[in-house]
Image: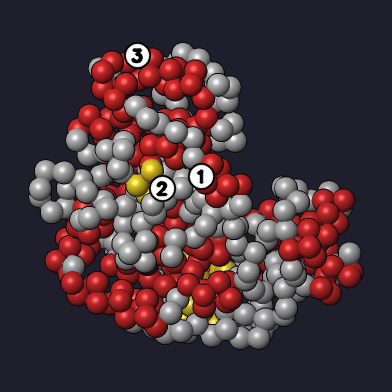
Amino acid sequence: MRPTFLPFVLSATMLTPVAALSQDCGGSFGSFIDALTQEAVARGTDQDTARSFFAGVQQDQAVLRADRSQGIFQSGFIEFSRKLISQNRIDRGRAKAQEWDSVFDRIEAEYGISRGVLLAFWAFETDYGSFQGDFNTRNALVTLAHDCRRPELFRPQIFAAIELYERGDFDPQTTTGAWAGEIGMVQMLPRDILENGTDGDGDGHVRLKTSAPDALLSGAKILSELGWRPNEPWLQEVTLPDDMDWYQTGLETIKPVSDWQAMGVTAREGSLTQGLEASVLLPQGRGGPAFIAYPNFRVYFEWNQSFTYVLTAAYFANRLEGGQIYDAGNPAPGLDGDAMKELQRKLAARGYDVGKIDGILGAGTRAAVRDVQRELGLPADAWPTADLLSRL
């Protein structure tokens, strides 16, 4: 099932140079719709078409509730990955790989993107198309654009949806998807459909809700546009030496693979890919699983900003292609949300920039934990524990 939080939306774009004719957000909903209609006409949409698109539009309070209660991941990688990756999902993914073998062959030939990568996104976003969301997409986009939390993200998507409507690829009354406006099997916003939507089955339309070839090829085109390097790996499980310099781990440190190898980093399965730069990741500290992340791994963050989600998706792609289950090790217990907030407050009091005090182990908090661990003479593996909290 699709995660309940709003991911970083693919190729999220700001408002185009045509100026908004009224308030950017908030205020009277009716006046807001009138302004959107006028702006659509100013952008070149026929007036009758614009009015037809907005006819019957409504604010969706369920969308706002979903937006306010986003379940950002607080669980660790091991717990989260075990929740999302089941044997059933693996079996279904491998069956889908066989069913759409010719489509994946085409993707691998044209984009150099391995089938496991797209299968993992397909699984996590909509459970291979089974759960695509039942929110009216137009209402969701307009509701979120009217709301003043992130109007710069959602307002441009409305005009993209109008353009899709003009093409016959969007019905404002019946098109449905996720609460945040994403549509189809791999969950794309209207702007991304315009820019990267691909007619994979040759019927003259881009049908991301009903056509697996369209959805998969569109997803592949987006990844390519975001910088995917053809025919290169993305993630590999590794084994680390006991005397590892733990401070060197994390996304902030990038070294040639040969340097990591010289430090004693070895592949748990197969061999490391030479000639590339990479980072070594310890999602739950030195006692838990360890991975080497190649350049393509960073493209995942253009799809979703959650480190836990990204790492799980990348690892699942390997599993779908026959990779082994990671060695979970024996990581030290992490902190719950309240303890994490306390840790963040203590780190902030020491001058570290951890961003919002939200109980989330994000990039800023991980970096601060690693630095303060080194300051206190602890193994600097960026994994916060009760011992670290007590020392602070």
Q: Name the residue type under label 1.
A: Val
**Residue depth check, mark 3 versus mark 1: number of the one nearer the observer:** 1
Q: Secondary structure at mark 1?
A: helix
Q: Earlier in the sequence, mark 2 or mark 1?
A: 1
Q: Are marks 2 and 1 in contact (CB under 8 Å)?
A: yes
Q: Quick one: label 3 or label 2, which is nearer the N terminus?
A: 3
- Give the mark nearest the N terminus, 3 or 1: 3
Q: CA distance from mark 3 to mark 1?
A: 28 Å
Which mark identifies residue 16? none
- Picture coordinates of residue 351 (x, y %)? 83, 49
Disc 3 designates what residue?
42
Q: Residue at x 49, y 40 (%)?
A: 60
Q: Is residue 13 visible in the rendered structure shown here?
A: no
Q: Nearer the viewer, mark 3 or mark 2?
A: 2
185 or 308, nearer to the observer:
185
Mark 3 and mark 2: span between their CA atoms?
28 Å
Local crowd size for mark 2, using a 10 Å CA cut-off: few (<14), some (14–19), many (≥20): many
Could you tell me the amino acid type at mark 3?
Ala
Q: Residue at x 84, y 68 (%)?
A: 389
